[in-house]
Image (cartoon, rainbow, N blue to C red):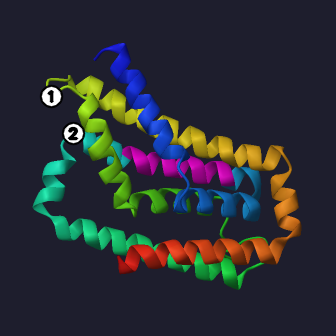
């Protein structure tokens, strides 16, 4: 693959990662609730989840989606229900620090990050629609794998950066002071996104 194709792919992946949505809301919530480490692990988990769909996109997931359209719908509904569950937890534990419970540990961030990406088939559709045109039909397997890894690294890096910046700039401290109201706002955002996924 030519350099221009790699640059185009990197730009598409960066634009997708930086677009606002449920993923950023979860990273933000986990960073506020559990600090830098939990936020970073959420970003890493999200990146690995995206890697699953990126691999599928570059190695022919379109065929599977066309063959089993109902499966995509089921995953989407599960993603919506997961967001609703996160919203309920955020509301129940508003102002208490951790939305998941005291024994959640830092692994909670990784699990949330991976789950919110894997349970969002719109990420798969994004890669199928936008990565396909940049990958030549005769591209080597290593080039295809490289594209998937690039997408995973860009996505994970963006959310790790966002988590670190939230802490470094003191935004988490300010948001933590507003505790209960920030948690309730994020709960409302997550609930809205979850409801939209379930009902659409």
In the image, the segment drawn in magenta is: 39-51
Rendered location of residue 7, percent (x, y)? 42, 22
Rendered location of residue 152, percent (x, y)? 45, 39
For the point 36% across and 17% down, the residue is 4
The residue most toward the left is 67
User: Where on the picture, by quarter, is residue 176?
Assistant: bottom right
82 is higher (above) or lower (below) than 50: below
For the point 35% across and 76% down, the residue is 200
Label 2: element kind: loop
User: Where on the picture, by quarter, is residue 69?
Assistant: bottom left
Rendered location of residue 78, percent (x, y)? 38, 74
**Which residue position is annotated with label 2?**
59
Q: Magenta: predominant secondary structure element?
A: helix
Q: Earlier in the sequence, mark 1 or mark 2?
A: 2
Rendered location of residue 89, percent (x, y)? 63, 80
84 is higher (above) or lower (below) than 49: below
For the point 38% across and 53% down, the residue is 123
Residue 46 lies in the magenta-colored region: yes
**Which residue position is annotated with label 1?**
137
Mark 1 and mark 2: Cα distance apart in space: 11 Å
Q: Residue 156: give its label.
A: none
Label 1: element kind: loop
Residue 122 lies in the magenta-colored region: no
Left or right: 50, with 104 as reference point: left
User: Where on the picture, by quarter, is residue 23?
Assistant: bottom right
Of residues 17 and 98, the one drawn nearer to the viewer in this rendering: 17
Q: How many marks?
A: 2
Residue 1 in view, yes or no: yes
User: Where the N terminus falls, by quadrant?
Assistant: top left
């Amino acid at each position: 693959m030519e350099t221009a194709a790699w640059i185009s792919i990197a730009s598409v992946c960066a634009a997708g990662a930086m677009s606002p949505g449920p993923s950023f809301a979860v990273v933000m919530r986990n960073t506020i609730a559990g600090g830098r480490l939990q936020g970073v692990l959420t970003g890493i988990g999200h990146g690995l989840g995206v890697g699953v769909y990126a691999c599928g996109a570059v190695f022919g997931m379109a065929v599977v989606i066309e063959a089993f359209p109902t499966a995509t719908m089921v995953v989407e509904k599960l993603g919506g229900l997961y967001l609703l569950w996160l919203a309920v937890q955020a509301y129940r534990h508003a102002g208490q620090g951790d939305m998941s419970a005291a024994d959640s540990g830092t692994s909670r961030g990784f699990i949330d990050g991976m789950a919110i990406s894997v349970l969002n088939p719109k990420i798969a559709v994004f890669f199928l629609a936008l990565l396909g045109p940049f990958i030549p039909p005769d591209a080597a397997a290593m080039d295809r794998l490289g594209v998937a890894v690039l997408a995973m690294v860009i996505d994970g890096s963006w959310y790790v950066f966002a988590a670190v910046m939230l802490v470094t700039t003191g935004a988490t401290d300010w948001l933590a002071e507003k505790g209960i109201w920030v948690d309730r706002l994020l709960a409302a955002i997550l609930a809205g996104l979850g409801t939209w996924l379930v009902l659409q």
